[in-house]
Amino acid sequence: MAECYWQKEIETASREQIREWQSERLVKTVKHVYDNVELYRKRMDEAGVKPEDIKSVDDLKKLPFTYKQDLRDAYPYGLFAVPMSEVLRLHASSGTTGKQIVVGYTKHDLEVWDDIAARQLYAVGADENDFIHVSYGYGLFTGGFGLHGGAGRIGATAIPVSSGNTDRQITILQDFGSTVLCCTPSYAMYIAEQIKAKGIDPKTLPLKAGIFGAEPWTEEMRRQIEEMLDIKAYDVYGLTEIMGPCVSYECSEQKGMHVNEDHFIIETINPETGEVLPQGEQGELVFTCITKECCPFIRYRTRDIGIINTEPCECGRTFVRMSKPMGRSDDMMIIRGVNVFPSQIETVLLRQGYLPNYKIIVDRVNNTDTLEVQVEMTEDMFSDTVTKVKEYEKALESELRSLLGIGADVKLVAPNSIERSMGKAVRVVDKRKLIGG
Ligand code: DLL
């Protein structure tokens, strides 16, 4: 595929130029938040840092972190750095626990968002001739409006389907000429399964690419979706606090997501100590917004675990790439003292030919942690004998043990018996937390 850029001069700028932009914009942003948001003034004063101390990106580490709890404490508008008359849009995210967090966007913030979503669309080969089928939820969740804005920016035809009603999604995919599908990877998988169940040949659909994100997914899942939908599947990352989707975006190389470094500075830190790690080492991703007006969070702790790759990319973009986040530090399960990420379990299941329809149940029985993995059998297995099914279970248990280093109890369940998700999939039930709090 010929490489297309939405803003070539920016996306392929020299590293020196990017650094210069970052330094200049960081200095401006720090002054902006210090002057307009009480929390930053207080935190910086406590840390003994004045806006004048921040002269370049090298000084970033002097600044205190911000956390999700800060947004909860300031609910709803306590961290806004502009008057409400300048706020054109609000979005919110509830997460799985706690009070929802609210963010605002000025006209300029929305324009930046449209541009970074446009970069993502161009990077997957879309242009004004494409039909962008947006099945992320429209509403306070940022997914729908985020990609929709990008489609408008490049002059493509947006199809704002939103999530849900899978039969209708499929009719639209068939009749409206959708060429790019945007939704969570778990919903893409579900749509793919339903297309198969209806006996529709994906090759008859005009769909060519998918932009999937908002939740962790593995390379194995990417391969399955690509095969089942006969498309190229691209990853997209983002979070409400920083902007929404397209904080970083994947290119045709499909080897990590380019961080929009002219708008956000990325760091990886040791989540325990807060120490900045050398690029290339796995750690918690921390973002600083350097062009936002309403909610420019500084050194925001995402809890996502990833790696920054500074190697030049074949696509010609010079922005560093971040790996797929392997999970969140707060999704990491500690089972019998061993750290386990749901994505590791998914990798094993998919490598063994299962679909990503599974549930992980963690419990504590007689003071010992238990790990149960329920996964749907494939259609062909379903007609096998009980003995054969037991063999499949044993085979999976042995694979899981060798990858995780601890034993898991595998239960193969009937096809289509695990609840599907139209948005972010909930795969883990940790009964220990439900009980112990
Ligand atoms: O999920 C924004 C988004 C919408 C991103 C559509 C991509 C596409 P939140 O609801 O605030 O925002 O959730 C943010 O989702 O901290 C990650 O833990 C996770 N996440 C987002 N993208 C990815 C991805 C949107 N590509 C949280 N891979 C983040 C893994 C992801 N995790």
Image (cartoon, rainbow, N blue to C red):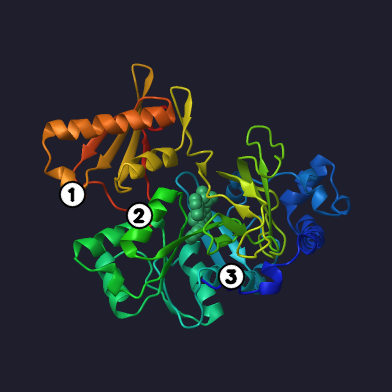
In front of the other: 71 or 51: 51
Residue under label 2, please give it: 224
In the rendered image, is residue 422 in sight? no
Secondary element at image label 2: helix
Mark 1 against mark 3, which lies toward the viewer? 1
Q: Is residue 319 left or right of residue 231?
A: right
Residue 388 in the image, given as x and y percentages of width and height:
16, 34
Q: In this view, does 107 lie to the left or right of 230?
A: right
The 10 Å Cα crowd at callout 1, few under 14, some 14 to 19, many 20 or more, is few
| Disc with the residue nearer the chain's start (1 vs 3) | 3
Q: Which residue is drawn at 46% across and 49% down?
A: 216
The 10 Å Cα crowd at callout 3, few under 14, some 14 to 19, many 20 or more, is many
Q: Does the residue labelled 2 lie within 8 Å of ligand 1?
A: no
**From mark 2 to mark 3, how far is it between C-alphas?**
25 Å
Mark 3: amino acid: Arg
Residue under label 3, please give it: 119
Residue 379 is labelled as 1
